[in-house]
Amino acid sequence: MIRHHWRTPIVFAGLLLICVLYLRSDQNLFVPWYGPATIPVASRNTTGKVHVVLLATRPDLNLCKTLLTAAALGYPIPTLLGWNKTQGTKDQMSGGSHLVKITDGATYFAALPQDLDDDLVLVADAYDVWLQLPPEILVQRWRKVTRGADLRTSQRMGKDTSTPTFQHSIVFGAGKRCTPNLFHTVACYAVPESPLPKDMYGANTDTIVGVNRWSSLRQRYLNAGIAVGTVGDMRRIFNHANDRLSQIKAHEEFDNGSHESDFIYRGSDQSVWNTIFGEQEFQREAMRREGKPYSSVEPSWMEGTKIDDPIEPYFTHQSMERTTPGRHEFGIALDYWSEVTQQTINSEQDTRFLHYSRPLTEQLNPSSPFDCKPRSGQLSADLQSGSPPYHSSGNANATWADVPLFSNICLDSVPVIVHHNGIKAARETMWHSFWVSSLLKSLPMVYGRYVAQDTFLRAHDELIALVCKQVRKESLDWLGISWPLLVPLKLKYSSSGSESTFHKPNHILRMEKLQLVGSMIVKEDMERKLSRGVEAELSLPTGFNQLPFSDCGSEDCYT
């Protein structure tokens, strides 16, 4: 079980200040931060900790929301990958920034020592992800999804002792489309049929009849926006993905003439992960047939196209050779039931904010005749037995049934993570319905506990006090926060009772790499600048010069 330790409002206030500071700055203030995790994992073959890694190439209000939801729920300090960095050509989407998740991800995992291989790591997009449930639920859901995949794969492969036992350790989100890859590639046609109910959308299930041509499809394909896995196995799969990037070709031979696949589908990391998963499943099916040469497989449908054979379909397709066992095996499992993450794209009709303490019938009114038959019932056992949602703010009375939870009503699931890869405007329109937004507003009013220990600033050394007295009002309005904010943001140093030298300079350097230094930019040569818009008092060790102050103006500041 994950242990929670709670600390003062300094943590949340400091996090909020950082968001405001970088959103106000025109400078390149940030570089990736590589820091240790802080939350122990009671494990499935692991006794390690949880790490959080986000792909964040630029400042954005939506990045703030991701960071704030993580901090409020007690997740460890995120590592930001790819800040102000691109990889590729101008012909690729976002200048190739999507591929940075792979290149910098491979670098990140290579730098982690092998004694962390049993730790668990969450790798996520940074601008459209909200964390809804705490980290201990994430760990429990990861175990549940991987164990379920183990069981299904064993049943699929049969009991032939010559067939290796597969154990899954990496969970990706599941989506309804094989995109951007072309249908006739291994990335799409080799993917096994979804285990979700075949009557999920009635007679329309797995047809192009629905609100759009994808809304009635069952979740079947990998979505790369969220991945959770052990460090050792993530290191291996990221190295493999990085090797695939080195093999980029301008024109792939399996393209159908549209050149959609050029430059890895215009620089799509999603296409790389789709291919890796498709190749894993191709090789598994080939291995199954070697053990059961006379067995057959039931046909499936891919957006109206019949897949009669998942390794040799009847239509023109990209071929793949049977390879050495294990070469394409990465232990990838998909989160079909949206227990770890819900993709919002093509699933708008499948989801609702539900209060489980109220009658559900009145909350499940269909929005169109193509909707699924709702299956929502009671909250899952892990939520019923877990810590209550507001215990960090001192309210132990409210239960998970009392807060609005973003739920998949077709699958009766409440995901840990909401991935807004559908209608992007929902990140604004849904924010005030999201229960964590109310938690964020309540935390600064409670002193002494909320946000897990070591969630954002470390508390191992004595403190350098940096008091940021005022934050621009309009920078907070997007959160719906209307209270005066006095921010005591503190940094750590000590030297045997003296406050003249740094005892552990790496703590400062680590924080510096995410700019967790309030209004300063601290570089290795200790150059210092003051971000515009924050009045500050600064207490620094001997050898530091006092910084000038900047007034944000009475017309747009809290006083």
Image (spheres, rainbow, N blue to C red):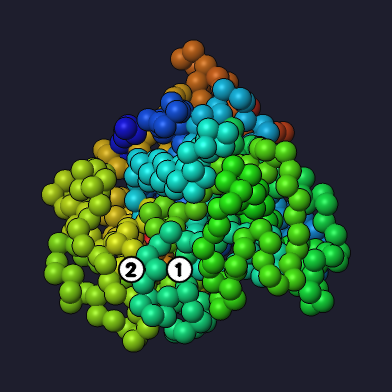
Q: Amino acid at mark 2?
A: Cys
Q: Position of residue 366 (x, y in %)?
A: 29, 81
**Where 219 falls versus 423 (above or below)?**
above
Q: Position of residue 352 (x, y in %)?
A: 31, 70
Q: Is residue 169 left or right of residue 250?
A: left
Query: Is 387 placed above or below 363 here?
Result: above
Report how far apart the C-alphas of labels 1 and 2 lie in the structure: 10 Å
Q: Is residue 252 visible?
A: yes
Check disc 2: other Cα within 10 Å, few if <14, some if 14-19, many if 20+: many
Tag 1 residue: 218
Total tally of numbered discs in the picture: 2
Q: Are marks 1 and 2 in contact (CB under 8 Å)?
A: no
Q: Which one is nearer the viewer's eye here, 151 or 160?
A: 160
Q: Determine whether 463 is above or below 169 in the image.
A: above
**Residue at 49 percent of width and 43 percent of height:** 158
Kindly identify the residue that appears in the image at 82 percent across and 56 percent down.
Answer: 248
In the figure, residue 316 lies in which quadrant?
A: bottom right
Element at label 1: loop
Q: Which mark is residue 410?
A: 2
Taking the spot 80% from the left edge, 58% from the top edge, the residue there is 88
